[in-house]
Amino acid sequence: MGRVTRSGSTILVVDDDQSVTASLSLLLKNAGFLPLVAATPERALELLQARRIDLAIQDMNFSRKTTGEEGLALVERIHRLRPDLPVILITAWGSISLAVRGVKAGAFDFVTKPWNNEQLLGIVQTALSLAHGKPGERLSREELDERFDFSRIVGSDPALLRVLETVGRVSATDASVLILGESGTGKELIAEALHENGRRAGAPFVKVNLGGVASTLFESEMFGHVKGAFTDADADRTGRFGLAHRGTIFLDEIGDLERALQVKMLRVLQDRTYEVLGSSRSCRVDVRVVSATNRDLLQMVRDGEFREDLLYRLNLITLKLPPLRERQGDIPMLANLFLRHALESYGIDRCTIDEGAMRWLNGLEWPGNVRQLRQTVERAVLMSGKRSLSRDDFVHPDLVDPGKDESSLPPVGRMTLDEIERAMIEKSLAHYRQNLTKVASALGLSRAALYRRIEKHGIEM
């Protein structure tokens, strides 16, 4: 997986330490860039006004002041002079908070000393690629599908297309991406599309649901352990970062990560190194980081629940997925897709959704978004047994019609949620002849979750 550089791009290196400028100049030159050096902020500003410069790398500390304020002031002046110029900051680990202030002031990203050459070059290439992109470009769904593989993402609503355009632009880079959106909006599908359309396609895509990782198991789960590291560690285990090496790691539910564990996550994301539990050996990892959450991380930062420096390490690019109620034009397309999937899964020959039902579905709020629509269609197919589904086949207590208050809704209490769940499991068991693996797959459950529901409902096997 070779790195494609923009040959001839001029990069300004700003640092008063000659050993640093010499090292960076050699690294950049060998990578195909044209380095320029400035030892002072004043000289950096002169060069920016006199030469065509594509990117700047600057230290945050200069000899006359060691607090970093001079470096911060330079970031602000560069941003005023060249707001489109990507600036990458270099700082010590203990000064990450200062680098975060620099990012707020307009810098593109930051690295800590001692930097990793490959990681730094990756950030440089990402910054140049995004700076040369076309943020105002508006493509149709057909044009997007000609350029990228978005086959698993259904829809052509403008709100969704704007997200896909950005996915297309950044997928070829190694930029860290934070995906925001309500539960059920398809954040994992977007993460997979970023991976599959990038240079790491074909390498591992490793998903971690951080909300389901106990704090006591975090280091073992993420970094792995050696035999004997703790009680019951009877064999070596590779952690999620190790499994994702040279691929993409998807940190789902990042907002649920306990604050005490956030600094451990920050260190591996910053340094791209970690230690296996029970071993002093340091492992280097090459991964692209994509994370997702349905929580408001900025508010969590203000409330002291989420580290600001971790947020700025995660959200170089932020994608906000629209809820289903904001892309209503896609509801009929999605409903018919889920209908076809349900018919195939349950071996039903033919079934349609009538016009009245489709209009009604299109007007609902869908608090559970695409996931809720899929479950609603599957439930109607299983429970009705009809060739044409009407509105009454979809009416259910968890579907609220925004055009009516609760007092005017038709009776919907014919079956409780538990009764519907039991009926779906029983029909699936009969259809798949008690094959629990197929039943679990059809219902979107793990085998363990299916066992628990069978036991809960007292279903006889």
Image: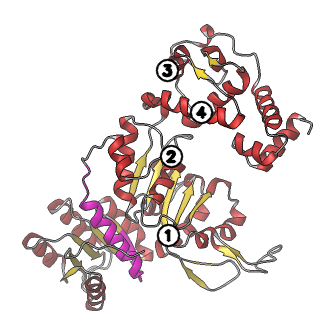
Crowdedness of circle 4 by 10 Å Cα count: few (<14), some, many (20+)?
some
Q: Secondary structure at mark 1?
A: loop
The region drawn magenta spans 110-135
Left or right of residue 2, residue 139 in this image: left
Residue 152 - label? 2
Judged by depth in the image, the label closer to the viewer, 4 or 1, is: 4
In the image, is residue 118 part of the stretch drawn in magenta?
A: yes
Left or right of residue 287, residue 73 in this image: left
Q: Position of residue 28 (x, y in %)?
A: 28, 82
- Precedes in sequence: disc 4 or disc 2: 2
Q: Residue furthest top?
A: 408
Q: Give the residue number, with chain letter if any, for mark 3.
A: 363
Amino acid type indicated by mark 1: Val
Residue placed most toward the observer, 204 or 409: 204
Looking at the rendered image, the quarter that the C terminus falls into is top right
Residue placed most toward the observer, 26 or 337: 337
Q: Give the residue number, with chain letter if any, for mark 4.
A: 340
- Precedes in sequence: disc 2 or disc 1: 2
Left or right of residue 53, residue 407 in this image: right
Q: Marks 4/2: CA distance?
A: 15 Å
- How many labels, in total? 4
- Precedes in sequence: disc 4 or disc 1: 1
Q: Marks 4/1: CA distance?
A: 37 Å
Amino acid type indicated by mark 4: Arg
- Precedes in sequence: disc 4 or disc 3: 4
Q: Marks 2/1: CA distance?
A: 23 Å
Q: Give the residue number, with chain letter if any, for mark 1.
A: 287
Q: Marks 4/3: CA distance?
A: 21 Å
Q: Marks 3/1: CA distance?
A: 42 Å
